[in-house]
Image: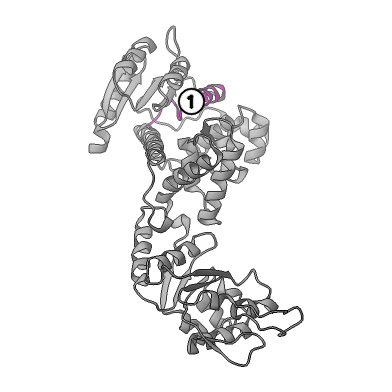
Amino acid sequence: MTARRNHSILVVDDAPAALNIIQRNLESKGYRLYTASNVADAVKILERAPVNLVITDYKMPRISGLDLIRHIRENFYKTEVIMITGYASVKGAVEAVKMGAEEYLPKPFTDDELFGAVERALNKQSLRDAVMVEAAREPSAPHGIIGRSTSVRKLLAEIEKASKSTATALVLGESGTGKELVARAIHYSGSRASAPFVPVNCGAIPEKLLESELFGYVRGAFTGANESRAGFFQTADGGTILLDEINEMSPPMQVKLLRVLQDKQVCMVGARKTQKVDVRIIASSNKDLRALVHQRLFREDLFFRLNVITITVPPLRERREDIAVLIAHFAGKFAEEMGKSAPVFSDEVVKTLMGYAWPGNVRELENLVQRLLVMTDGRTVEIPDLPSVMRFSAMSGSVPFRPLAEEEAVYIRRVLASVGGNKSRAAEILRIDRKTLRDKLKPGTGKTSGTGRKGR
């Protein structure tokens, strides 16, 4: 209730009965209400009082609700708008959306539909405000790990514990989650911080070269070995080596790595004697190593040697509350590199990105933000600027439960609005013919009147 008292709503309708019903219903939920019977009075209220949301009727004498929406979008960017009307039509919905209305409610509508529309509009505003706040300040980023979610706080606590030890560590997580960032955080927070940190991508080095790259080789060991060369283990002596994507390592190389873990010694290719090395090993994998062990694709004894300290990095879909912070961080980072101002990400865009599955995790989000800053000319990133796979997800969203026929009608109006009222294109998207679409657009008879008037 306290959060609602912080939200003020202006209702504009020339019908006193409708105005009173909406005011009474919303005040019962704890919102602060202003009312106006015409656009001129509404504008005066907007100029003297902070208003979070405007609910306006479509048809009013002299100046219409569309004109009010246009005025709000030009002068009160942060204020959300809901259009209500008894003259429900595809054209009206399209015009309202084009002008900037967040919701379009045809009369008669139920109280739950009204409350749902208000909650969604105010949630969008809160989300946009959160992104703007994050963009205005540098997010706290211990070890470069961005986020304030519970899972990120847990991850940072595990990193701190792991850094106090020199035991072998295993970092698990999907591709793009930031496993190397976690490994670096463990190294640079520990006693070996002043010594080398050497990352090695096991999957990027050809199998025939991996042994010589890891352990080095002596002159004459093979054709082209004109001089002796130290490997990554010797380079990391006194520090930490990260064996990234260790699941890609072949069984023969797994045996050789196991001996290094057991003896703390390496043997250069072509050499007869081993060398003592003092290296902390951190391994990472984007696959379930335990499952690979059961499939006999990874040695069980090596797995147990590596699995002393295990840290699992959560995928981005499990820390969606961090997405707004990450957007602000990456936008600021790339804007600075490009010598330009960071654009504003609209609330619809942020909401869409928060609902996306992110199979590429944080790396995918970072690449997307960079692409948007390069390809977007305007000061605001909007839904059309997103890749098509994400634009389609923008049609989704949380709505209150209601009869299937009503839900279908709302969805059809959204599709029509998104294609500018083009019924052929809408029918194509919906995979129905134009006749079926026309039938579904005919006024229904199942709604109950909670706040509207028939005929308006």
Q: Residue furthest right?
A: 223
Left or right side of 208 for 1: left
Q: Is residue 294 visible?
A: yes
- Please tell me whether residue 180 is drawn above or below residue 89 in the rendered image: below
Rendered location of residue 11, percent (x, y): 34, 21
Q: Classify residue 192 by image quadrant.
A: bottom left
Residue 99 falls inside the magenta stretch? yes
Residue type indicated by callout 1:
Gly
**Mark 1 surroundings within 10 Å by alpha-carbon count, few (fewer than 14), some (14 through 19), many (20 or more):** some
- The magenta region covers 91-110
In percent of the image, x 75 and y 78: which residue is there?
224
Kindly identify which residue carries mark 1: 100
Q: Classify residue 27 by image quadrant.
A: top left
In percent of the image, x 36 and y 50: which residue is there?
140
Pick the front one: 296 or 16: 296
Quadrant for the C terminus in the image: top left
Rendered location of residue 449, percent (x, y): 37, 27
- Please tell me whether residue 245 is drawn above or below residue 149 in the rendered image: below
Rendered location of residue 444, percent (x, y): 50, 30
Pick the front one: 388 or 203: 203
Residue 21 falls inside the magenta stretch? no
Q: Classify residue 216 by image quadrant.
A: bottom right
In percent of the image, x 54 and y 78: which residue is there?
234
